[in-house]
């Protein structure tokens, strides 16, 4: 089973996620399985936790949430 999340926020028109993406932990485990996946969308971030490594996935999703909160106080997090 996997867990999917949508982190919705108003992304600025000239938003560049490169600093965030460079700070993310590796999404691949030592066993070469995908820990998490994500996409940057026009209305926020999509995050997929494959339930492989909760510490790494938890740290990654926290970075996405912190990034959204750095730009706005209006962030909506949904479990899909």
Image (cartoon, rainbow, N blue to C red):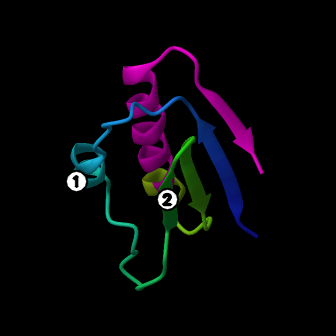
Image coordinates for residue 49, horizontal then vertical, percent:
60, 60
Eyeballing the image, is 47 above or below 64?
below
Disc number placed over residue 45 in the picture, else none: none
Q: Estimate how packed mark 1 is, as few (under 14), some (14 to 19) or many (20 or more) residues with alpha carbons within 10 Å.
A: few
Toward which corner of the image does residue 12 lie, by quadrant?
A: top left
Q: How many marks?
A: 2
Disc number placed over residue 22 in the picture, else none: 1
The magenta segment is 57-80
Q: Is residue 74 magenta?
A: yes
Q: Residue furthest front?
A: 13
Closer to the eye: label 2 or 1: 2
Q: Estimate how packed mark 2 is, as few (under 14), some (14 to 19) or many (20 or more) residues with alpha carbons within 10 Å.
A: few
Q: Which residue is at 41% across, 85% downward?
A: 32
Q: Which residue is at 57% across, 54% downward?
A: 47
Image coordinates for residue 25, horizontal then vertical, percent:
32, 57
Q: Which residue is at 40% across, 75% downward?
A: 29
The answer for how far apart the CA atoms under marks 2 and 1 are is 14 Å
Q: Residue furthest top?
A: 73
Image coordinates for residue 23, horizontal then vertical, percent:
24, 49
Q: Is residue 4 magenta?
A: no
Quarter in which the N terminus is drawn: bottom right
**Which secondary structure is most common in the magenta stretch?**
helix
Apparent side of residue 32 relative to residue 8 in the rendered image (left or right): left
Disc number placed over residue 39 in the picture, else none: 2
Q: Which residue is at 45% across, 33% downward?
A: 11
Dot placed on the residue nearer the N-terminal end, 2 or 1: 1
Q: Secondary structure at mark 1?
A: helix
């Amino acid at each position: 089973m996997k867990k999917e999340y949508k982190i919705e926020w108003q992304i600025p028109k000239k938003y560049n996620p490169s600093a965030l993406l460079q700070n993310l932990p590796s999404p691949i485990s030592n066993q070469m399985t995908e820990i998490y996946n994500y996409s940057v969308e026009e209305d926020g971030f999509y995050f997929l936790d494959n339930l492989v490594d909760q510490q790494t996935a938890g740290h990654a999703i926290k970075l996405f949430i912190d990034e959204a909160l750095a730009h706005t106080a209006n962030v909506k997090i949904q479990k899909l």
